[in-house]
Amino acid sequence: MIIGSHVHFNEEQFLGAVKEAVSYDANAFMFYTGAPQNTKRSKINKEYIEKGLKLMQENNISLDNVIVHAPYIINLANKEKIESWDFSISFLKNELKRCDELNVKYLVLHPGSSVKYTKEEGINNIIEALNIVLNEKYNCMILLETMAGKGSEVGSNLEELKTIITNVSTKIGICLDTCHLNDAGYNLDNFSNFLEEFSKILDLNLIKCIHINDSKNVLGSHKDRHENIGYGTIGFNNLLNIVNNSKLKDVPKILETPYVNKDDNSKELLYPPYKFEIDMLKKGIFNNNLKDNIRDYYK
Ligand code: FE
Ligand code: FE
Ligand code: ZN
């Protein structure tokens, strides 16, 4: 099973990300190359890359299973303020360059929100922007993430993603997100059925990453609030089926589930759940003491 989680990229940058992944017994990981909500980016440190690669080798982690997530302030769908749209384009180019420096093969991108534009116009704005970005060649491939359909988000149905993919000059892929699929209205009770539906629209080989999250909300709610594995409306067995699906066995599975609070009365989310959620999925047995086990381990 190729499984890991979101990790940090701070003082020790790439090396720190690998260390954190190793601490969760993960063989895959994903990070933002800076804060997700802003575009401040520090220079990539080469020494940390070398040390990180060495640590990956020692722990049998392949570069195929390392993902970068683009900051969510990039919005290619909205052209209302042309300076912002241009900035999103140049920032995305820069992010792809950083991925190439880091030897990272996949960059996950939210397609964008159309805001005052219609969906169709938003989709055209995305296509235009991606074709500008991909005028230059990068080793790193962009993966469009399936979205929950919150507000005016583009990408909550597979047809929209197909329109983008078929009109972009360079090959781009897909990142499934289980919480987003559920919230968008795709029932994951029978994942084989979903994959069959997917394969009628898009090639299954385009799926290069899967975000594994439970959802706090019901099917089709268009909310996008992640829940810990087995504690939401998708449920443990459905998520277990997804991570064990033979057609997607080489695709890295990345957890983006919420941190656990200090105690039930605290709003402060302190402890990462990933070590325990990864263990639970590898063993295939639901742990109904997950939060207490996490608190005991980290406190
Ligand atoms: Fe995302
Ligand atoms: Fe996601
Ligand atoms: Zn989400």
Image (cartoon, rainbow, N blue to C red):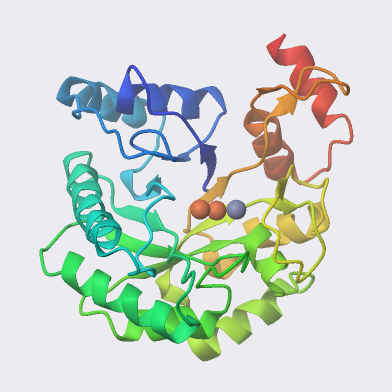
Looking at the figure, which quarter contains the C terminus?
A: top right
Quick check: 141 left or right of 257?
A: left
Residue 209 in view (yes/no)? yes
- Which residue is painted at 39% across and 70% down in the image? 77
> Picture quarter containing residue 42?
top left
Q: As displayed, is residue 3 above or below residue 210?
A: above
Quick check: 155 left or right of 124?
A: right
Q: Nearer the viewer, residue 51 or 144?
A: 144
Quick check: 36 left or right of 149?
A: left
Q: As displayed, is residue 200 above or below residue 5?
A: below
Q: Nearer the viewer, residue 136 or 132?
A: 132
Image label count: 0
Residue 244 in view (yes/no)? no
- Which residue is painted at 44% across and 40% down in the image? 37
Residue 51 at x, y = what percent? Answer: 25, 21
- Which residue is painted at 84% across and 36% down in the image? 287
Residue 187 at x, y = what percent? Answer: 75, 74
Q: As displayed, is residue 211 above or below residue 40?
A: below
Residue with the most extreme left position = 136
Quick check: 74 left or right of 270?
A: left
> Picture quarter containing residue 137?
bottom left
Residue 266 at x, y = what percent? Answer: 81, 20
Residue 136 at x, y = what percent? Answer: 10, 64
Residue with the most extreme bottom position = 200
- Which residue is painted at 77% across and 17% down in the image? 262
Q: As displayed, is residue 92 above or below residue 59?
A: below
